[in-house]
Each structure stands twice: as structure tokens, then as C-alpha cells.
Amino acid sequence: MIKLNGKRIILRWAENKDVKDLCENAHDNEIAKNTRVPYPYQEKHAKDFIKKSKQFESKKENLLLVIELKQEKKVIGTVSLMRINWKHNNSELGYWLGKNYRGQKLMNEVIPLILEYGFKKLKLERIFAQTFDFNEASQKLLEKHKFKYEGTLRNAEKKKNKYLDLKMYSLLKKEFKK
């Protein structure tokens, strides 16, 4: 059981009780626009996320965690280390936060916790993140946590019949400071 504690948040595996909170917070056009999270976000999506979250112990491919606000005991977002490549010790970082919780610097607690777990516990060498080229808030967040911009992947993803560019960022284990 994974449980990472921050000052105001807890990162943990998703549970069946989280369906309502996940649906409430992920059902947001902004999240869908800036991530790969579907819209409209429905109960089936939340249940699928929870099912995949529980598979990490056996499959070791995707570490999918919820972000729980300690004070409210409410799930307000997710953070993930996806497509873990054990041969090359790298993984993709993904995250989203419900609109009512943005601008409170909560991700400044989330990112160091997941990075520390990835580098120290999972022994990853490189953690990378991809943002759509228009997602400046996510780019600034990554840069604040010392991720380096590596380049733009042109027409890398198709969304609503439109090709979008992805900006690639990465952080190496030796560059990580909690």
C-alpha cells in the first residue's frame, strides 16, 4: 500500500469510495483540453482508473495515485508515473487537479513527493512529462521543479481531429533535490 504524506495532501492508491470525487473533479473541459483525461468524465472512467490503480502491485507498469486533501478527506486530482520502462528506468509523469483546488500551490507538494518516490523507491533514472504546447501553466510547474525542456514533438497527438504539438520535459535522478 502506497501512502505519501505532504503537509496538506496525501498521495495514495485509488479506492472504490473515490468514484464520486474523481467524477466531480475530472468532469472539467479544462482538464480534458490539457490532458488525456476524457470528457465528459463519467463513473466508468473513474472505475477504470481505480481498477488500473490497483494493478500496480502485480503489473508494475503504471503507478496511478489520487491526490487527497487531508483536511477535507476528499480526492481532488491524480498524479501518475505511467508506462514505467524498467529496462531503461524511466517513466512519464502525469497529473491533473480539480478546478476548485488550482492556484493553491498544492502541486508544489505533489510533484516532489511523486518524484522522490520515483527516484528513490522505484530507482528511476529519468522522469519525463509531455504538455500540449499551449499548456503554459503545466510548463511553468515543471520548470519550477527543475525539469528541463528537451524539445517539441510536432503533430505528436491527435485530439478532436486536430494534430497538436507536445513539449517534452525531463528530470534526471542526479538533478532531483527534494
Image: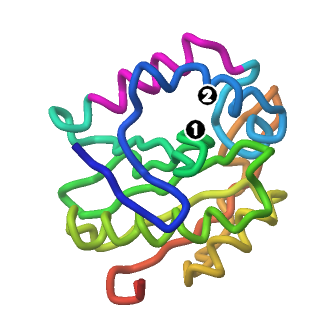
Q: In which quarter of the image is residue 162?
A: top right
Which type of secondary structure does the marked residue at label 1 adopt?
strand
Q: Quadrant of residue 175?
A: bottom left
Q: Which mark is residue 145?
A: none
Q: In which quarter of the image is the C terminus?
A: bottom left
Q: Which mark is first along the chain, 1 or 2?
A: 2
Horizontally, residue 31 falls left or right of residue 46, namely: right
**120 or 17: nearer the eye?**
17
Whether residue 178 is in magenta: the answer is no
Q: Are marks 2 and 1 in contact (CB under 8 Å)?
A: yes
Tell me the magenta residue range: 41-54
For the stretch drawn in magenta, the main secondary structure is helix
Above or below for 57 versus 47: below
Q: Classify 10 Å Cα crowding around label 1: few (below 14), some (14-19), many (20 and above).
A: some
Above or below for 172 versus 56: below
Q: Distance between the residues labelled 2 and 1?
A: 7 Å
Q: Classify 10 Å Cα crowding around label 2: few (below 14), some (14-19), many (20 and above).
A: some
- Residue placed under numbered mark 1 in the picture: 74
**14 or 38: nearer the eye?**
14
Three-letter amino acid code at the position of disc 1? Lys
- Residue placed under numbered mark 2 in the picture: 21
Instruction: Tell me which residue sits at (15%, 32%) in the image.
Output: 58
Three-letter amino acid code at the position of disc 2? Asp
Whether residue 47 is in magenta: the answer is yes
